[in-house]
Image (tube, rainbow, N blue to C red):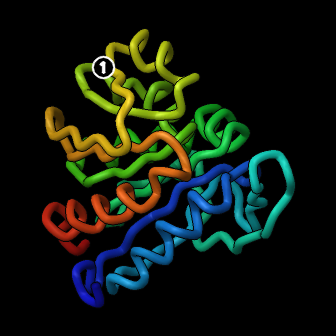
Amino acid sequence: MASELKGLRVAFLTANEGIEQVELTEPWQTVRDAGGVPELVAPKGGKVQAFNHLDKADTFTVHRALTEHEGEPDYDAVVLPGGVANGDALRMSPPAVTFMRHVFEQGKPVAVICHGGWILVEADLVRGRTMTSWPSLRTDIRNAGGNWTDTEVQVCDQGPNVLISSRNPGDLPAFNRTLTEVFARQAQPA
């Protein structure tokens, strides 16, 4: 697994606080190990604060801060880590919502885990899509016109892009394997 994603730029979009650390670090390492170039994107520059469930964990440096006047995203794919506070804060960021709408319009593949799906609900990007998430998002996804399923990893290609989703940290092995396969097949270097 050394070159499947060679040269692909993958945005990891998070809020500035509340990211579930393992849902950031394990996919990040997977992308890096496969030859991809992960970049941390957040509403504000500086650092983001990760958590291990409810306990503060490590901080990570932001590579790119979003702005109100964000142009077209120049990434080949996007990963949306989870974390309750992360998902809730990210969906309240207009630049982040706009960023995700552009990603979907461009047909770029997206991988989302746990509470990361809230931004997709906010951006009206789940309508007609099948996905999984942390169970508490089930009603939000259904109310937004999506189809929710309780499965380790779900791949939906019924839309403008391929959408990969998983429920929780226990699904990370399948999530990471699937995002590598799909990103390698779908993403075209920017």
Q: Nearer the viewer, residue 20 or 190?
A: 20
In the rendered image, residue 74, in percent from the top left (x then y), is placed at: 35, 65
Indicate the amino acid at tag 1.
Asn
Residue 104 can be seen, yes or no: no
Q: How many marks?
A: 1
In the rendered image, residue 159, in percent from the top left (x then y), is placed at: 17, 34
| Furthest residue toward bottom | 2
In the rendered image, residue 175, in percent from the top left (x then y), is placed at: 38, 56
> On the image, numbered disc 1 is attached to which residue?
147
- What residue lies at 53% left-to-right and 44% top-to-bottom? 168
Q: Name the element at disc 1.
A: strand
Q: Nearer the viewer, residue 112 or 62?
A: 112
Task: Determine which quarter of the picture holds residue 7.
Answer: bottom left
> Does residue 22 lie above or below 142 as drawn?
below
> Does residue 100 lie above or below 79 as drawn?
above
Task: Determine which quarter of the picture holds residue 56.
Answer: bottom right
Q: Nearer the viewer, residue 127 or 180?
A: 180
- Left or right side of 109 for 63: right
In the rendered image, residue 125, in percent from the top left (x then y), is placed at: 35, 29
- What residue lies at 70% left-to-right and 57% top-to-bottom? 44
The quarter of the rendered structure image containing the N terminus is bottom left
- What residue lies at 28% left-to-right and 59% top-to-bottom? 178
Q: Nearer the viewer, residue 96 or 27?
A: 27
